[in-house]
Amino acid sequence: MNRFLLPVSVVGTVIGGTVLLKDYVAGGACPSKATIPGRTVIVTGANTGIGKQTALELAKRGGNIILACRDREKCEAAAKDIRGETLNPRVRAEHLDLASLKSIREFAGKIIKGTGVTVNALHPGVARTELGRHTGMHNSAFSGFMLGPFFWLLFKSPQLAAQPSTYLAVAEELESVSGKYFDGLREKAPSPEAEDEEVARRLWTESAHLVGLDMAHGSSGRGHSISR
């Protein structure tokens, strides 16, 4: 019996350590149980992956959910899936091609002005989504066999990866928080480059130029309004 004690202990330690590591990497579920009846949420890229899971989570909380996607057919199918799973009839699909300024402006023309808007950035973590479907790795049996366990251990499921965006959208304690960066469910200081005021001004000016917007008052600083 003693000769089996060490191997069993090693295996148990490895399994336990793997589970703990996976829990740490995954980051856990959204800690807020808040609901959002009457609130409208737009989720881009919502026909698959993290976007669809985010829309699903928010639909469960009673929101009016707009799925904004480039492929209208897939978007309609995703909206139907979400309505069926959540029994929330206030889930609809709208066409939005983020590579087209014309499409963006047409979409924005359908949606509503409001106040109290907050904007935060987040990194949801590395997830197993369709984003890597064009790499060819998924078509290789060898890669799937060799790398599959590492993907399972280190990559989040789309459902878990959607928890941070759900948290930022519903958490009552974050209603007035804006301009922050979140790594998973935790607020984190951004990189020094992200806090460089000169870089920010150049980015703002160049972005306004690329999308055909003119700076009001001829200023290139942040915080100024812009007009078409």
Image (spheres, grey):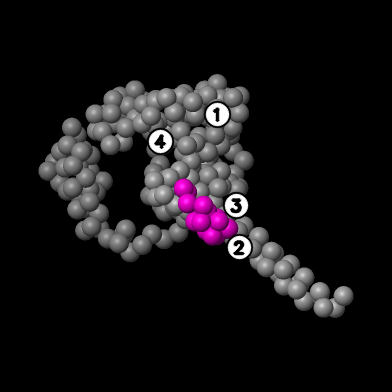
Disc 4 designates what residue?
Answer: 44
The circle on residue 82 is 1
- First in sequence: mark 2 or mark 3? 2
The amino acid type of the residue labelled 3 equals Gly
Please tell me which residue lies in front, 147 or 206. Answer: 147
Neighbour class for label 4 at 10 Å: few (<14), some, many (≥20)? many
Residue depicted at 26% across the width and 33% down the height:
100
- The residue that appears at 41% across and 61% down in the rendered structure is 189
**Residue contact between numbered discs 1 and 2, judged by CB atoms under 8 Å:** no
Q: Nearer the viewer, residue 171 or 109?
A: 109
The answer to whether marks 4 and 2 mark residues whose Cβ atoms lie closer than 8 Å is: no
Say whether disc 1 or disc 2 marks the residue closer to the N-terminus.
Answer: 2
Give the residue at mark 3. Answer: 28
Q: Main secondary structure of the magenta part?
A: helix
Is there any visible trace of residue 154 in the rendered image? no
The stretch of residues the image draws in magenta is 138-151
Q: Looking at the picture, how far across and down is residue 54, in whole percent? A: 51, 39
Going from N to C along the chain, the mark reached first, 3 or 4, is: 3
Disc nearest the viewer among 4 and 2: 2
Q: Nearer the viewer, residue 2 or 164?
A: 2
Which image quarter: residue 87? Answer: top right
**Vertical arrangement, residue 220 with respect to residue 101, above or below:** below
Between marks 1 and 2, how big is the CA–CA gap?
31 Å
Which is more N-terminal, label 1 or label 4?
4
In space, the residues marked 3 and 4 are separated at their CA atoms by 23 Å
Q: Position of residue 108 (x, y in %)?
A: 32, 28
Q: Tag 3, which secondary structure?
A: loop
Q: Which residue is mark 2?
A: 21
Q: Residue furthest left?
A: 218
Counting residues from the start of the chain, the first of labels 3 and 1 encountered is: 3
